[in-house]
Image: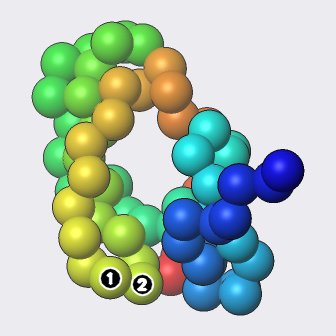
Amino acid sequence: MPVPPTAVARSGKPLNVADGVTVIGNITAITGSGPTATVTLTLAGSGISVAVQAQDCAASTQTL
């Protein structure tokens, strides 16, 4: 039996635990260097800040 979606994205698509996602935002800080640096970004849609390890990111330079 399928598990119902736990959330719905802006696009209307369902989101479930373990789904891969792409977020849009601007980098506001970088602490450290190399693949283990902490990258802080502000999400474009909500304005919420999140911090992730650099090696978990893929960047595409765009002007928002």
22 relative to 40, above or below = below
Q: Which mark is residue 45?
A: 2
Q: How is the image coloured?
A: rainbow
Q: Is residue 21 visible?
A: no
Query: Image point 25% across, 28% down: which residue?
Result: 38
Query: Image point 15% across, 28% down: which residue?
Result: 31
Query: Image point 33% across, 12% down: which residue?
Result: 36
Q: Is disc 2 placed on a helix, strand or loop? A: loop
55 relative to 29, above or below = above
**Crowd tier of the residue under label 2, counting other residues whose Cα lies within 10 Å: few below 14, some 14–19, many 20 or above:** few
Judged left or right of residue 1, residue 50 is left
Q: What's the residue type where badge 2 is placed? A: Gly
Q: Which mark is residue 61?
A: none
| Image coords of residue 1 (percent x, y) | 84, 50
Quadrant in the rendering for residue 12: bottom right
Quadrant in the rendering for residue 62: bottom right
Q: CA distance from mark 2 to mark 1?
A: 4 Å
Of residues 60 and 40, the one drawn nearer to the viewer in this rendering: 40
Judged left or right of residue 21, residue 28 is left
Q: What's the residue type where badge 1 is placed? A: Ser
Query: Image point 42% across, 84% down: which residue?
Result: 45
Judged left or right of residue 20, residue 64 is left
Q: Is disc 1 placed on a helix, strand or loop? A: loop
Q: Which mark is residue 46?
A: 1
Badge 2 vs badge 1, beta-carbon distance below 8 Å: yes
